[in-house]
Amino acid sequence: MAGSAAVGIGALAQSTSRSLGPLAPPAPVRIPAPPKLVEARPAAPRSAFSTVDPKLLRKALASLDRHSKLIKAHDRIAIVDFSAPSSEMRLHFLDVIDGKASKLLVAHGSGSDPHHTGFLERFSNAFGSNASSEGAFLTDDYYVGKHGRSQRLIGLDATNNNALDRAVVVHSAWYANDDMIRAHGKLGRSQGCFAVGENKLDDVFRFLGKGRMIYAGRA
């Protein structure tokens, strides 16, 4: 979107509400081959996900369990900690199989930060709000749009179930590049999308692929 802009310790629990028709992408998208979906969920070391706030982690894991019929792959998840400012790496990638974690910068919506302070003030699921939404998102198909290569997201909760129709997606943007922090002390803002740096998009696509969860919220 344009703008001015770990996992449960121990084994994870075993394992939208609407039917989606096929969405034809405007053009073929060339992306890194996503990892194979894996349902096995071995325990990860306690220390591996210590960078994620424990309260937010519990929320994400509860959501993963609640939506387990829709989210088939529990081997990798992403958690966005919107308690942190946009100047911090708050998009957490958690690999349950090998117990590794990494993180990236990610922008929030202008409607969530109307004064551009760098802090998210509110969530919204409303059309035209240009705000970020909280809850569990299922990563879906890829397409090429006005922001280049992008990935559609399906909102699984009442707080984000308009995500698909609002075109809340994952894409890259200049205003989410690392140098924005050096120059302005914060990232620019999206219109509600998860915008990452232009040289980080392949990392996101490669890690999550299709059919995994992104959980966004605050501790």
Image (cartoon, helix red, strand yellow):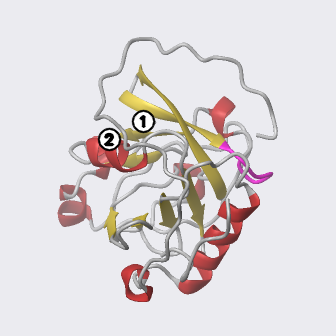
133 on left or right of 208: right
Q: Residue at x 44, y 67 (%)?
A: 96
The reply to whether the magenta stretch includes residue 218 is: no
Residue 159's quadrant in the figure? bottom right
Residue 156 image point, x, y percent: 72, 48
Residue 31 image point, x, y percent: 30, 30
Q: State the quadrant of the C terminus.
A: bottom right
Tag 2 or tag 1, which sits nearer the N-term?
1
Front: mark 1 or 2:
2
Q: State the quadrant of the N terminus.
A: top left
Residue 36's quadrant in the figure? top left
The residue identified by callout 2 is 173
Q: Residue at x 65, y 33 (%)?
A: 164
| Numbered-mark total | 2
Query: Magenta span covers which residues?
Result: 155-160
Alpha-carbon span between mark 1 and mark 2: 8 Å
- Whether residue 5 is visible, yes or no, is no
Q: Residue at x 55, y 54 (%)?
A: 39
Above or below: residue 155 compared with residue 43: above
**Which mark, by number, is residue 2?**
1
Tell me which amino acid carries mark 2.
Ala
- Whether residue 49 is visible, yes or no, is yes
* Mark 1 residue element: loop
The reply to whether the magenta stretch includes residue 157 is: yes
Q: Nearer the viewer, residue 84 or 182?
A: 84
Magenta region, mostly helix, strand or loop? Answer: loop
Q: Are the residues flagged by discs 1 and 2 in contact, CB closer than 8 Å?
A: yes
Circle 2: is it few (<14), some (14-19), or many (20+) Cα within 10 Å? many
Tell me which amino acid carries mark 1.
Ala
Q: Nearer the viewer, residue 140 or 74?
A: 74
134 on left or right of 45: right
105 on left or right of 77: left
